[in-house]
Image (cartoon, helix red, strand yellow):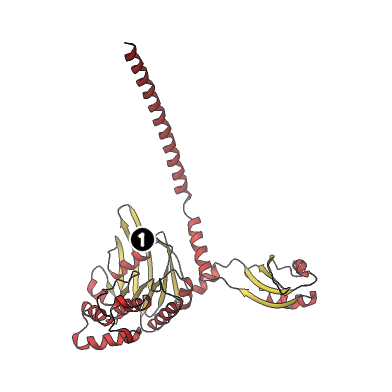
Amino acid sequence: MIEVKNVTKRYGSTIAVDDISFDVKDGEVVGFLGPNGAGKSTTMNMITGFIEPSCGQIIVNGNDISKKPKKAKMDIGYMPENVPLYYELTAKEFVTYMAELKMVKRNVRKQQVQEVLKEVGLQEVQNKLIRNLSRGYKQRVSMAGALIGNPDVIILDEPTVGLDPKQITEIRSLIKKLGQKHTVILSTHILSEVSQICERVIIINKGKIIAIDSPENLEKATKEQNSISITVEDPKDNMKNLKEKISEIDNIELKRDNNDGTKQYIITSSPDVDLRKKLFEILPKEEIVIFELKKTETTLEDAFIKIIDKAKGTEPKRKVENKKAQDSSKDVATKEKNISEERKNKENKKNTEKEEKK
């Protein structure tokens, strides 16, 4: 459905996107993640045809976005982050206007507008001015504008930004529904959203793709330890000797003394060891009563942070060394300049004194 091949975008000497390649399959919901300034919006703007790549190729549904822009853009619906709307129009008027721009045939235009308004839940407010709608409804109007014309690809840039928890849940459910009929690319900073909605995740950092996989696989790949949270009643304080009884335990950390006399611990082991069965077996023998035991899971947010940190750690040392060399040369140049100025000042002072004596 979407193929991005060796795409680079330069702004003068700055490289915003650096030789990236990925594909999005028909009917797939993909999360596009990265820190601020990573190149997400630039990439999405290139896919939609808003800006041209400096080099490389983007193919949408078999059409090269640079060579056949009209055909490619007909298959794309784009919802930008900042919700660009005409506030003096009603919701229905705005969606109708978008239908005209997308050259939806006149004989089916009214029907399509009503279908889209129904799909995004705007029927009850369709005749209200957009300026009088809540932030959540404005997001829906923007999404309706992206959906009109029934494009195969929907690109959503931060669709839940600025919404309250109820509105976020509603928009999230709407995106799930869209994934049943469309190919969806979703850019967001809310990583729990990606875990719930997306089948695959693409992570970009400093203009380069650094990871492509399912949320589950990324979480597993970045997991360094198994961790168990356990709340126990331990009147004889036998938890301190538990490592002697279970050799697979790497660490036991007391997290909290509860008011009811119980204590919460975090017990860690290597990723390939699951301690739960042994804990259920050993603790009763040590007169330790288990109140709660649960395995703590690595989240996509944990995985994202580790992947970004790892990417930072693998940057060439040459850059750092070059920077030090530049800084050093700057210091030398500054010192030389100061010495030169001091000499000039001394010479000027001597000349002034001679003139005064004369």
Amino acid beneath label 1: Val
Categorize mark 1 by other alpha carbons within 10 Å: few (<14), some (14-19), many (20+): many
105 or 214, which lies in front? 105
Q: Is residue 299 left or right of residue 86?
A: right
> Is residue 76 visible in the rendered structure shown here?
no
Which type of secondary structure does the marked residue at label 1 adopt?
strand
Percent of width and height locating residue 295: 63, 74
Q: In the rendering, at what x and y percent does residue 240 appear?
A: 76, 66
Percent coordinates x, y for residue 248 in the rendering:
70, 68
Which residue appears farthest toward the front when viewing the image?
A: 132
User: In the current view of this chain or complex, which residue is farthest to the top?
Assistant: 358
Q: Which residue is more in the foreground, 175 or 161?
A: 161
Query: Looking at the rendering, which quadrant does residue 31 occupy?
Result: bottom left
Pointer 1 residue: 17
Instruction: Left or right? Give the position of 72 relative to 207.
Output: left
Q: Residue at x 53, y 67 (%)?
A: 302
Confirm whether residue 125 shows in the render: yes
Residue 101 picture quarter: bottom left
